[in-house]
Amino acid sequence: MDFKESLIKAGEIARKARDYAREITKENVKYIEVAEKVEKKINELGGKCAFPVDVSVNHIAAHDTPLHNDERILIKGDLVKIDLGVHVDGYVADTAVTVEIGTNLHKKLIEAAEKALNEAVKLAKPGTEIFEIGKIIQEEIVKHGFIPIKNLCGHGIKQYEVHTEPTIPNYNNNDKTKLEKDMIIAIEPFATTGQGLIMEGKNSSIYELINLKNTRNFEARKILKFIDENYNKLPFCERWIIKEFGVKAQFLLKQLENEKIIQQFTILPEKAKGMVSQAEHTILIGHGVIT
């Protein structure tokens, strides 16, 4: 299977998983139930998770995946961003949807991100200068009465790498770099009622391998071998490692983090605690949307 076939297959699975996520994200459902059901669906459809499913609610913009013992429950009025990634042979399809639980109070905020994405996708073709995408996203979100989050952005994608160059902004950053045929990019507008900035919050329990080197602890070495063989450069989470190695993995992951072998992402709240919506597609430049 060449990279296009792998990517298209990943996109088909991501699309089905996103639709499934929308169906199951309901009142009184636990965050962990949403994440684990979507992850299971990805595997059942023949893909692998490119990163842990994020269930980021209300003013949390991104990177909130449930802990292994998470008891949080979705309630009426919650604004839920489900961000998921699928890979086939390391080729990643990254997509997201925003679901409001039981009300329509934030319908326009959801539409702002979705319409910004739809307009941006029309420009995602060879020769487009990157600032043009940011400009249309910003204009569309502002037109709907909201603010784009400027320090969250779309990105390039490479085999076993979710975030690479180029950066795809959610505002006009004057970047005149041109998109090229066969580039893989994710466009992901975030719209907010807040300041349009995110900050770093608490630890997320999502990790990535940054420096494959030896560690003295035998048990930690076993975990490191598992991480290297199963995730490569792709993000993973504490919840997944605990399933394989038990609760002792929490201590061992911390040791690997202290040795700067893995690093942990932080949860990303909106600075003014404004409500946040997100929409995302992956595009193969010159071939169109794959999610």
Image (cartoon, rainbow, N blue to C red):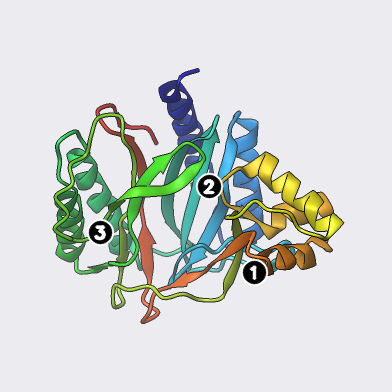
Which sits in the foreground, 67 or 107?
67
Disc 3 is placed on an element classified as loop
The image shows residue 175 at horizontal and vertical percentages of 17, 54
Disc 1 is placed on an element classified as loop
10 Å crowding of disc 3: few (<14), some (14-19), many (20+):
many
Residue occupied by mark 3: 170
Residue at 20 percent across and 35 percent down: it is: 125
Which quadrant of the rendered structure holds the C terminus? top left
**Cα distance, mark 3 to mark 2?**
25 Å
Q: Three-letter amino acid code at disc 1?
A: Arg
Q: Three-letter amino acid code at disc 2?
A: Ala
Relative to 250, is 138 on the left or the right? left
Q: Three-letter amino acid code at disc 3?
A: Asn
Q: Give whichever of discs 1 and 2 has the lower sequence position.
A: 2
Residue occupied by mark 2: 21
Q: Give whichever of discs 1 and 3 has the lower sequence position.
A: 1
The disc label shown at residue 136, or none: none
Residue at 43 percent across and 45 percent down: it is: 95
**Cα distance, mark 1 to mark 3?**
30 Å
